[in-house]
Amino acid sequence: MDFDEMLDTWRAQDTAPPYGVNRDAFRQALEIEEAKVRKELRSRRRGLWFFWIFGTGMAVWAAVWIAITITNGWSVIYVITSGMSIGLFALGVGVLWVSRGREPGRNFGNTLQEEVRRSLALVDYQLSLTRYWIILLGVGCVVVGTLLFSWTTNSSQDIPDSSSGVGWFWFVVVFAVLIGRGFYKERDKMREAKAKLELRQRHLRELLAALDAPE
C-alpha cells in the first residue's frame, strides 16, 4: 500500500483515530514518496544545469565574437547581433536560475508529524515549480539567442546559403511552431501536476492537523 492508498484509508475512517493506520508503515510510505520526489527534482536540476552551462558558454563565445568582429573590421551589424545574443543568453540563464527556487532541507525530526511536515514542504516546493511560463521563457531565450548568434557567425563568415532569406524564414516558422506546441503541451502538463499537488497538499495539511490535535 503506497502513501496515497494509506491516506485514503485514513480519511475513510469515521470513528477510528488517525493513528489507526500503522504509524511505522505510514512513515515508511512517506519516506518512499520523498525519495521518489527528490529523484525527480534531481533530474530536473540536471536539465537546468545543461541550459545554465550552455547559455553561459554561448554568452562568453558571443563576447569573444564581438572582439573578433571589431578586430577584423566587419560590419557593425554583427557587433549588434552578438550583443543581442549575449543579452538573450544572460536573460535565459538568469530566468532559469530563478525558476529553480529553493529546495527544502531535511532538518526535520523522525516523528510521523515531522515526516508529514517534510512531505508538505516538498509539495509546497513542487507547487512553486509549476510556473511553466518562466521555464519556457528561460529556455526560449537561450534557443533564440543561439539562432541569432548562429546567423551572426555564418553571415560574418560568408558561408554559402547561410543568409538565404527563404530558407531562414521557413526555419524560423518551423521553430516558432515547435515552440508554440511545446508551450501548450507543457502548460497542460503543469496544470495537471498542479491540480494533483494541490490535492496532496490539502490532504497532508488535514493529516498534520489531525496528528497535532490532542487525543
Image (cartoon, grey):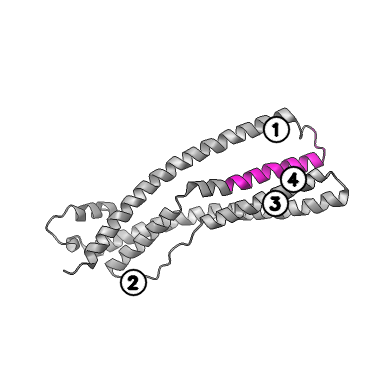
Q: Is residue 174 above or below residue 82?
A: above
Disc nearest the viewer among 2 and 3: 3
Amino acid type, residue under disc 4 in the picture: Thr
Q: Secondary structure at mark 1?
A: helix
The mark that comes first in sequence, 2 or 1, is: 2
Q: Amino acid at mark 3?
A: Ile
Pointer 4 residue: 81
- Above or below, 18 relative to 54: below
Q: Which residues are magenta?
A: 139-160
Going from the N terminus, do you reach mark 3 or mark 4 first? 4
Q: Is residue 194 magenta?
A: no
**Position of 196 compared to 131: left or right?**
left
Residue topped by disc 2: 109
Residue at the image position 33 percent from the left and 71 percent from the top: 109
Q: Count residues near mark 4 (Cα–Cα under 10 Å), then give few for <14, some for 14-19, many for 20+.
A: some
Q: Which residue is mark 3?
A: 86
| Residue 206 pos. (x, y %) | 25, 58
- Disc 3 is placed on an element classified as helix
Foreground residue among 174 and 24: 174
Count residues near mark 2 (Cα–Cα under 10 Å), then give few for <14, some for 14-19, many for 20+. Answer: few
